[in-house]
Structure formats: C-alpha cells, structure tokens
Amino acid sequence: MANGYIIYQGASALDGAPIVVIATGFESGSTNRKTGSMVQTYVLRSDVDPVSAVRNGTDASICGNCTHRGTTATIDGQSKNTGRTCYVNVGQGALAVYRAYKRGIYPTLPKGQAPASGRKVRLGTYGDPAAAPAHVWQSLLRDSSGHTGYTHQWRSPQIQALRSICMASADSAADADEAQSQGWRTFRVGMWGEVERDRTRLSESLCPASAEAGKKLTCETCLACDGAGTAKRGSIFIPAHGGTAVMANIKKRNRTN
C-alpha cells in the first residue's frame, strides 16, 4: 500500500477548474497533534501550487466562497492576499503534498480499493470537500472507522449530499441558525465572548480538542464532527485560532463588522 493516493482528478464542482484530491497517511499516519493519526485529504488546484493560488485567487476552485480566504489584489505588479483568516498554513503540508504530486509520488487509487478500511479520515485537511463529487468521499469512507468533515458551501443546493457526512462551517450565530434550520449540524468559529453568549441557544458544545477545553481529546478520538447522518444531534464551536498574522486579521475583521 502507498502512503498516499490520488482519489479524484478532474473538474472542480465549484467552478470547473482542474483540481486533484489526494489522501495521505495510510502507512505513516499524520503527526498533527490536534487531529491525531487520521488519514488526511488535500483538495488542490492541479495546475497551480497552493501558495500561488492563495495569492492570485485561484484557490476559489477548491475553497469556494469561504470567508477565510482573504482578498486578492495586484500591488506593484504582483498578486497579493490580504486579510486571510484561514488557520491552514498552505506553505507547509498543502505545498508539500502538491510538490510530491507534481513529482509523481502518488498513484491513482485503483477502482474498488478501500485503503481507509478501519481507519479514521479527515475530509478537507485543506480545501472544501464540496469541490469534489460526493461519491469520491463516500467511496473513501467505505469501511472506515469514522471521519470528520466541514464545508462552507452548505447553502448550495448542489452539495446537499454532503450534509450526512460534513458539518456546516458557520462563522456567526446567524450562519449556525440558518444551517441548523436546513438540517445541518454546525461547526462554528468565533471570538470567545460571542461564543459564550450563543452556545446555549445554538445547542453547541466546546470542541474538546481546543486549547480552551484543555485538549481533552483529539479529533481522532472524538469524531463529533461527522455530519448529520448519525444519531448525534448537537453542534460544535471553537474559539478562533491560528498563527499571529491570522489572529491579527480575525481581530481586525471583528472590529470592523
């Protein structure tokens, strides 16, 4: 078995641009302390490295309308991104996977094979699962022992098949209200004060893998964020987190909203 596989390569369901979905960690496992040793999945432009895609805005093909992408502009003849609040550092794992893909490291997953059998899977380590057809994820999860998944595209009629396996990513209490009214369970990010005001009304629990919860569990041992297709009913919240620049942008955005 290879450590990683291409599980989809084709048009983005979001804008038709070329993308690739790569699942990794089948042999070595992830070293991510928050998620644990889950199979990780990366949704990437197949023709643009993730750092450049963030700078020039072509990451819309794999992240859609996510508010955390930031905005792009041409400054002094160069594309730059400002105001980005995504906690993912694309210059690390996502870029490494892209470069390995370009070197031809990852084989295409053979039809009918279920490499995640007995494993736990993280849908969208980077990128939104809605960028790929739902059957790609359903096939990967076949015989798995659990998963987590999130999508910012939950308002789109075309991706409702993901409701059973993904959480609706919510960035406000209003978002969470709307998504829950449509049958989604939600994962909401917010500043600590606003989270505390809204958690009871929205039937939210604090993410047990968060620093604020004392990192009691990893995502691998919790698996609360697995969509609306199980008997679980509550939703999850987590205070905003990320590197110094990300947190500065988050605080700036909250001051201006």
Image (cartoon, rainbow, N blue to C red):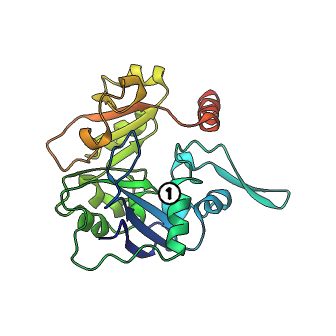
Tell me if residue 196 comes above or below residue 254 in the rendering: above
Residue 204 location, x and y as percent? 30, 29
Residue 142 location, x and y as percent? 19, 64
- Determine whether, in the image, residue 161 is placed left or right of residue 28: left
Residue lying at the far left of the rendered structure: 231
Residue 197, quarter of picture: top left
Tell me if residue 18 comes above or below residue 37 in the rendering: below
Q: Say what secondary structure mark 1 lies in.
A: helix
Answer few, some or many: residues within 10 Å of disc 1's Cα (few below 14, many 20 plus, some between 14 and 19).
many
Which residue in the protein does label 1 denote?
63
Residue 69 location, x and y as percent? 57, 50
Of the 4 image quadrants, the one containing the C terminus is top right
The residue depicted at 31 percent of the width and 69 percent of the height is 136
Tell me if residue 6 comes above or below residue 163 in the rendering: below
Callout 1 amino acid:
Cys
Residue 35 location, x and y as percent? 36, 43
Report whether residue 227 is seen: yes
Q: Nearer the viewer, residue 133 or 9?
A: 9
- Determine whether, in the image, residue 137 is placed left or right of residue 156: left
The residue depicted at 19 percent of the width and 62 percent of the height is 117
Q: Nearer the viewer, residue 193 or 43?
A: 43
Residue lying at the far bottom of the rendered structure: 111
The residue depicted at 40 percent of the width and 55 percent of the height is 124
